[in-house]
Amino acid sequence: MMSESKDKTLQKQEGSGNIVVLYTMVAQGCIECGRCRKACRFLQANGMPRGFAEEALAGRPDLRGVFACSLCGLCTSVCPQDIDPAAMFAEMRREAVRRGQGRFRRHRGLISYERWGGSPLLSWYGLPTGCDTVFFPGCSLAGTRPRRILQLYEHLERTIPALGVVLDCCTKPSHSLGRTRHSADVFGELVRALQADGVRNVLVACPSCYTMWRDYGGKITVRTLYEDLAGRDIGGPAQYPATVTVHDPCSVRNETHIHEAVRKLIAARGLQVEEMPHHGTTTVCCGEGGAAGCLAPQFADNWGRIREQEAAGRRIITYCAGCVHLLGRRTTVSHVLDLFFDPDKTLADQVRVARPPLTWLHRFLLKGKLRRRLKPAIIGRRGADGRVRMK
Ligand code: SF4
Ligand code: SF4
């Protein structure tokens, strides 16, 4: 079931050799300057990265404790020593799983959500004749905003006539929870099936999906649809002289090309962007990262508090449906796709976004709508054994 090329990287991570290298790099390189700790509530409660590494090298790794880290990467971004504590914490989670210490009851809901996303009921692959590019909307957008998926398809197919669509889960939750082998098997199967049918490019909406395709997508090239949309004649109304701010999802903190594309889409509607202190490469997590909120809501919630304070009453525009949901509990947040397609309702807070259990129904019904719209030559879905079958 394993695909080739980059999925081998995921398999390599199954060995324990990586982790000793990471511990050693952090233990030797960290000068305990405190910059990362100042930025992060998890580190304030648990000590600096060097302490984690030294304890681990002494045979006392806190493998369960690191599941309270959001894996947001801010520590890595602010480190003057070019150390990557976030990579060490992610690897510690994998080590926990390898040693059978990575199971938590509170992760069950997330694992189940992922499993349903890649189930025979909700997965669907539609490839028109000559298709070499697919749109991969991800689980969250498909459930909360199915109409946007159809609008996006119509918009994109103007310049990509044989555009396909794939509804499936990228398995980022498993990847974040250290379940690397599972993630490699399931995502690798998706990549293998698309490569075998001639797909070479994927357009994604979700930043988490982007990182999975970027890191493990084999020969398939990934791009966000924000870059695609920003590169076209955007058109539409541009008469909204309001001021907004932008939340960059932490999973794409280093992808400046995506940050720029989103700001271009916002500017195209006439809106002025005022940046928050944490943006771009130093953005903060929304609170959802690494599923830390399942085990340590006090740390995860702190990121949301920072965002609320920094937004200071301005509308936040972001490009992750999960971030919209989390931050929307605290302050006014809009998805850039809502702004792009429906600026009047978005700026009047009249966009209707589905919530569970309706999101499940939407995802199921979306398959039929796409099938009628695409009339695909090749249709696929996952079987109960996890394999993708195309015919
Ligand atoms: S929560 Fe973010 S900043 Fe804090 S240790 Fe984890 S990855 Fe680093
Ligand atoms: S920012 Fe870097 S050097 Fe400073 S305490 Fe954190 S890991 Fe160590």
Image (cartoon, grey):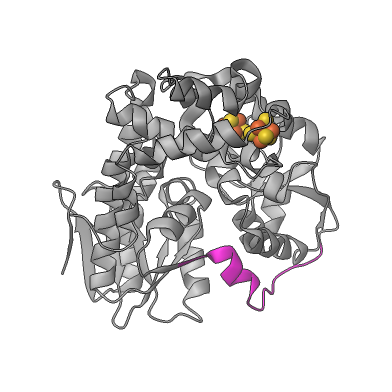
Instruction: Give the vertical position of 6 relative to 220 (above or below).
Output: above
**Which of the pair 273/94 is nearer the observer?**
94
Say if residue 138 shows up in the picture.
yes
Residue 238 placement: quadrant: bottom right
Residue 235 magenta-highlighted: yes
How far across and how far down the image is residue 145, in percent?
49, 50
Instruction: Give the vertical position of 201 relative to 343 (above or below).
Output: below
Instruction: Tell me the magenta residue range.
Output: 222-239
Q: Quadrant of the N terminus?
A: bottom left
How far across and how far down the image is residue 249, in percent?
61, 46
Instruction: Give the vertical position of 192 relative to 80 (above or below).
Output: below
The quadrant of the picture showing ligand 2 is: top right
Q: Quadrant of the C terminus?
A: bottom left
Q: Residue at x 66, y 38 (%)?
A: 284
How far across and how far down the image is residue 118, in percent?
28, 47
Say if residue 293 shows up in the picture.
no
Q: Residue at x 58, y 27 (%)?
A: 50
**Which of the pair 232/53 is nearer the observer?**
53
